[in-house]
Amino acid sequence: MCGIVAILNVKEQTHTLREKALKMSQKIRHRGPDWSGIYCGGSAILAHERLSIVDPESGGQPLYSPDRKQVLAVNGEIYNHQDIRRRFAGQYEFQTGSDCEVILALYRELKEKGKVISEKFPTGVLSEKLATALLEQLSGIFAFVLYDEERNEFLIARDPIGVIPLYIGYDSDGTVYVASELKALEGQCERYEPFLPGHYYHSADPGMKRYYQRDWFKYDAVKDNPASVDAIRDGLTAAVKRQLMSDVPYGVLLSGGLDSSVISAIAEKFSEHRIEDDSKSKAWWPRLHSFAVGLKGAPDLAKAKLVADHIGTVHHEINYTIQEGLDAIRDVIYYIETYDVTTVRASTPMYLLARVIKSMGIKMVLSGEGADEIFGGYLYFHKAPSAKDFHEETVRKLSKLHLYDCLRANKSLSAWGVEGRVPFLDKEFLDVAMRTNPEAKRPAPLPHPSSTFGSKCGTQCREGSNYFQGEGLIEKYILREAFADLLPEEVAWRQKEQFSDGVGYSWIDTLKAVTAAAVSDEQMAHAAERFSINPPKNKEEYYYRSIFAEHFPSDSAALSVPSEASVACSTAVALEWDAAFRNLNDPSGRAVKGVHEQAY
């Protein structure tokens, strides 16, 4: 991951303003410890903190067009950059080997087209058409600011799901601020907010506008679609292969759950060769390293080791103590910039793990985030009343990922200068998975060994295995079926265990006890007076909120964090699915009584 900062609509370039930008950028240097760069010109200042993953030698930023009339600061990975480069062969003189430089080439091309058709469309319509045409050609994760000195215009954009964080701020004089993390904006502008995923901001027609539109946003567009195990398998395999693009050592996060195990198994298949030349040459770092974290004896760790041995990775099990986790909480909240209970619980072990990963020279890891949102993997999905409710909840969950799991994964890793990639959220794979008939993604009975499928899958479905539930239902069935042959049977058919639970149940239990002792009943009674924005709902949240407010005291910061009741990571809408949910507010998977106990 890198870090970007921009000050736009600058009235006058001054030394003081440049120093301000440098100070803001310094706040996020943990995201890009390898190099720093800054551009000051026209009405813009762009600063960049680099974590070099592709083209470490010449890909420093900001990036410039050949005539230096356009300048780009970007945090991201463009997985199809080689295809785009080939298309521009002989037409555009690339200055570096950076995957992100293709954004400048695409902008220049569309800018020329815009000159031809500008008389036919109003400014706003033209801006939308060109921005969408540019951004839809990118396959990757990104947040960027592009400044066109020639036209004195700027374009800001964020990837479709919000894998990469981005915030936008404003002053009353029209100055616009952009930063990868809110700590760079806190105290530097009058107000700020998250820059929305799948949106762009073009100065010719100001304001955030959506460019990412898909038919699968609506249930009616997918309800009659077929479901193909082969399409899921081929689509995810292609996504993982795309995302192995790297010129530095990489690894995989292997929790021992289904999702990370699938990603790890696919990655291992391609790890011996370089993806950059279509596997024609040997990989620079041929052994794939996997990493798992948890308290000693945690449910996930034994399964992670089992998978690692099965697929052949060099495995590293990282143990932390409860006290080490508690000691890290204050730093964790500073880096992840949220007081959401689930996110803090899960970010702490991930933050500790990232430090070890960085110490071993690994700069990029693949992770399994997104599968539960796409395939309805959280245990509360067992309660979905219909395929329509199921699908609409998956769409809602995806729309909120930038506030939860994407935020956690990105910022926990970036705190130590490690980049996280998430193949389940690959743009092309999303279209395959989200257009799959929702009925086929709902929890389904495990196959009996005597059934047609059971007799074919052999030991996957062996009667008497500790995961075999008879008439019970298992979530993400179609994903399990697609990749069961790559995994040990007890992992392929293991029921969902949320990460903050799987690292060790005593972790959450201790957090509840410690925060309950630290926050008095009187403080909770007056919580709404102290925190008028999103008042804490329980003592654990109050504890995290107090630390957050020390780091980020502004109203903008408080409003940047979501606040809604949840059971096992559900949205508030899904609480209506079961009467037992309506008076609960517990993000742990153990809150879904009867489903969790079925497997444990």
Image (cartoon, rainbow, N blue to C red):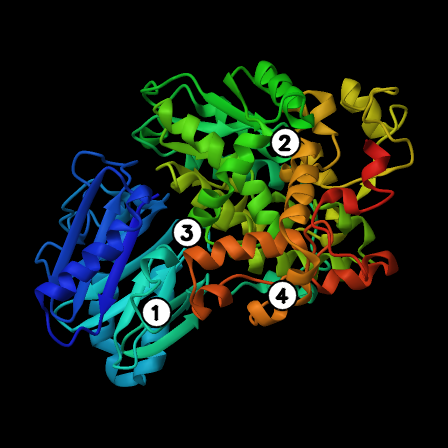
Disc 4, SS: helix
Q: Compute the Cα span from label 3 to label 4.
A: 32 Å
Amino acid bearing label 4 = Ala
* Badge 2: residue crowd in 10 Å (few <14, some 14–19, many ≥20): many
Q: Which residue is mark 2?
A: 503
Q: Quadrant of residue 23?
A: bottom left
Tell me if I can see residue 182 in this picture. Answer: yes
* Badge 3: residue crowd in 10 Å (few <14, some 14–19, many ≥20): many
Disc 1, SS: strand
Disc 2, SS: loop
The structure residue drawn at horizontal position 47% and vertical position 59%, both measured from the top left corner, is 549
Mark in front: 2 vs 4: 4
Q: Which residue is mark 4?
A: 527
Q: Which of the two labelled residues, at mark 2 and mark 3, occupies the earlier sequence position?
A: 3
Q: Which residue is mark 1?
A: 169
Front-most of residues 257 and 167: 167
Q: Which of the two labelled residues, at mark 2 and mark 4, occupies the earlier sequence position?
A: 2
Quarter of the image where the N terminus is located: top left
Asked whether the beta carbons under mark 2 and mark 3 sit within 8 Å of each other, the answer is no
Counting labels gives 4
